Amino acid sequence: MWSVRIPHHSWIICSRTAAVVYYALMVFAGFRASLDEYAQNKQWYLHIPLLLFGIYIFVKLLGFNMLEGLPFVLLVPYSFDFMLHEFAHIFTAFLPSILTASAGSISELLLGSGLVVGAFYFRNYFASMFCLLWFDLTCQSAGTYMADAIPQRLPLVSLGGALSGQDPVHDWHFVFGKLHMLGMSSFIGNSVRFVGHVAGLVGVVFATWLIYKMAAAASTPKTETVQSGLPVSPVRAIPAAPHAKKSIYPEPTRGDLAPRQESSPAAGNQHDSDKPAPSDSGHDIAV
């Protein structure tokens, strides 16, 4: 009989993989239950204008071009990202130069990622669409800057350089040059931009699906629920007896205080016949 010996490390890998899959399934099941709860008691039609506004922002992000200027709807959040970019350079000036140069774009990406994580952590699921769109914007900004490392067509504005009186330096030309990766700058930048567009599309599709869930939840009949979330059937009141006396004390069922049941004459005769006959011994029974 053939037998196969599996190495011990293979068992460890299999057990850990099974644990990860089980944990992922549990998280997914909890996420679905949370979405079902979120969709309850929502006025879905009020979310449609917000969805259309999100679609409009996503379309504008598809045509993102810093050389031709940005529309107002993108210029406002991009201005905030730009200030964060410049302050990140200043706050990390004590670090090695390669980290200081990359800190600007990395801070933008961290901001967008933090907004997405926060929206899902606090279960503001519909607001996650705008957070994902903001992450898309940060990816377009950072990716465009990375891809411009060789041509350097973007106008450079440096708050740190203005304060120190030095000429601005292209951050990613310096970083990729230090890492000997200038030849891959265009591929890396375009990949970051692609990831951003995927995130923005996921946000719009997810918001659309949420509105569908809200409309479906509004069309289903509502049932009473307790804190555990399980449906509760209505309790029917038991009608009281017509001549029942109201009392705060429970009614006894045994003993001398128990109410006597009225018996029919036939039943009374039957009970009388069951009594023992009087004794002829002539002795009286004292009571």
Image (cartoon, helix red, strand yellow):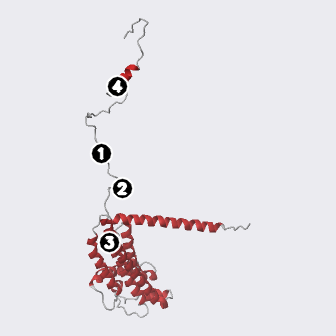
Mark 1 or 2: in front is 1
Mark 1 or 4: in front is 4
Earlier along the polypeptide chain: callout 3 or callout 1? 3
Residue 261 is labelled as none
Q: Amino acid at mark 3?
A: Ile
Instruction: Answer above or below: position of 235 versus 244.
Output: below
Category of crowding for the residue at label 4, using alpha-carbon neighbours closer than 10 angstroms: few (below 14), some (14–19), many (at least 20):
few
Marks 3 and 4, how far apart at CA: 75 Å
Residue 118: image x %, image y %? Answer: 37, 69
Q: Amino acid at mark 1?
A: Ala
Residue 165: image x %, image y %? Answer: 34, 87
Q: Which residue is mark 2?
A: 231
Q: Are marks 3 and 4 in contact (CB under 8 Å)?
A: no
Q: Which residue is mark 1?
A: 237
Marks 1 and 4, how far apart at CA: 37 Å
In the image as oriented, which residue stretches furthest toward the top? 282
Q: Which residue is mark 3?
A: 211
